[in-house]
Structure formats: C-alpha cells, structure tokens
Amino acid sequence: MIPKECLIIGGGSSISEGLSLGLKEKIQDKFVVTINFASYHFNSTFTTCMDNSFYKGKLLSDSKEINQDHINHLKSLPLIIAPNAHIRETPYNNTILTKKIKAGALTGIYALYLISYLLDYNGIIYLLGFDWSRRTKEEKEKNILAKIHYYDKIKHRGIGLSKYYENHKGEDFKPFLNYKNLKIYNVNPNSNLDYFEKIYYNKMFELLNKEKYNQEELRKEIKIKLQDQSNRKE
C-alpha cells in the first residue's frame, strides 16, 4: 500500500537549512520524491522531471554539448516518472511516462499532481525547497541574478532565472486547495508561495510518522497504480 505521507524535494536554497539539520538521515526510507537535480543529493523513491533538455543531458542553453555524466546519473536512478507530453526522447529503461496526469507550468506542480493522485487525494505532502524566490527591487535594478537553488556547483541553464516567480504568485497551485483530505505543508516559513501552511524543518521532523518503507516494494506499488491509470479509457 502506498503510504499517505510524502516528501517532495525541489531545488530551493532553503534546502540548505534542512541539510544542516540532518535532513538526509531523518527522511531515509520514507516516501520521498526528488525533482530534477535534487536526485544528486537525496536517495528517493523516485525522481521526476519534465524538461526534455534535462532528460537528454543538454544542461546549458548556450551549448549543444550533451553531458554524458548526467545521462549516466539519470540511468542509474531506480525510477524516473515524467509527463509523456514533455519528454520527447526515447525513455530510459527506468522511466515511466504518464499520459493522463496534469503537468502544469513547472516540475513542482507536476510532482504535486502526480503525488496527489498516488495518495488518492488523501494524506500529507511536505514541500521542501519550494521557495518561489524573487529578486529585490535593488537586485532587479542592478541586474543581479537571484540565488534560487541550494546546489551551487551544478552548472545548468536555470541558474538565477527568477522571472517566472516574479511574474506569477503560484496560481497553478490553487487547485490543490480543493482537496479537503489532502494536507500540504510548505517547509519554509519565508517562502513566497503562500497557498499552503508554512512550517519550519523542526516542526516537520516532529510531524513525520516513524514508519520506514521498503523502497523496492513501494516502487512496485507505484508502478502498478500508474499502469492501472494508463489503461483506463479517456
């Protein structure tokens, strides 16, 4: 049975605080989903992405170079789940492409739709690194890039790009407020994403259940559920 508690790990700089508090150890063998490059730093049940360039290893927008080390990393992951409409490459053997789950504008939104479905819209989801970072007025005037991600050493085309966050308030998250049996926590009191209750990491550690899950069995359950979903008629 898929547990009714899940952690989704994004890339926001607030993840650094969690790491300093022992986040990796405290969520070991939980139902954890990593988004994009967070898969480099956390063991997770599965990883999700929806950027075809990320998936095929083209990490820099000003270069046609394919990063083979990145592709090798993706292929080494136990499971990747991504939206069929966004991934145009031939999927790796560890990848499931979903056809009937909404994607939204950002991978974090897709991850929420996906997990909400897997939890039957009933349970608890913790959002980590969903900072919705924006530049200050002074930073905009001086054309200073925002510090968006907790991973500084990975070179990728999304570094400092905060324009989407500055132009949107997160309206795509609104539908999740309609699921009365789904509780969503944003684990960053300073996040600019205001649709969900904000808590500190220490509060999340208190709230997390004590259960540990066999990851292979959990992935098997997820695959079965997604297969059932793909077999349903429109």
Image (cartoon, rainbow, N blue to C red):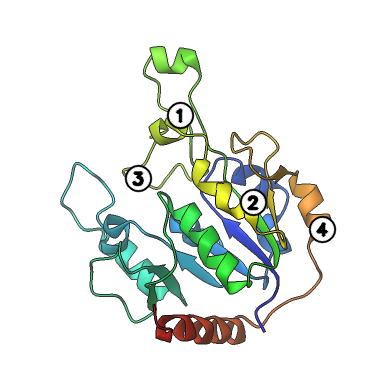
Mark 3: secondary structure: loop
Q: Alpha carbon of mark 3 to alpha carbon of mark 2: how far?
A: 35 Å
Image quadrant containing the N terminus? bottom right
> Which badge, 1 or 4, is on the more N-terminal residue?
1
Relative to 134, is 97 on the left or the right? Answer: left
Q: Earlier in the sequence, mark 1 or mark 3?
A: 3
The residue under the point 40% across, 83% down is: 233
Mark in the foreground, 4 or 2: 2
Question: Of marks 4 and 2, which one's residue comes earlier in the chain?
Answer: 2
Whichever of callouts 2 and 1 sits on the residue coming sooner in the sequence is 1
Nearest to N terminus: mark 3 or mark 2:
3
Q: Position of residue 3 (x, y in %)?
A: 69, 75
Q: Which mark is residue 150?
A: none
Residue at image x 59%, y 38%? 193
**Amino acid type, residue under disc 1 in the picture:** Glu
Q: List the residue tagged with mark 3.
A: 155
Query: What residue is shown with label 1?
Result: 166
Q: Residue at x 43, y 57 (%)?
A: 36
Asked if disc 4 and disc 3 are in contact, CB closer than 8 Å, the reply is no
State the mark number for residue 207. Answer: 4
Q: Secondary structure at mark 1?
A: helix
Would you name the residue on which mark 2 appears? 177
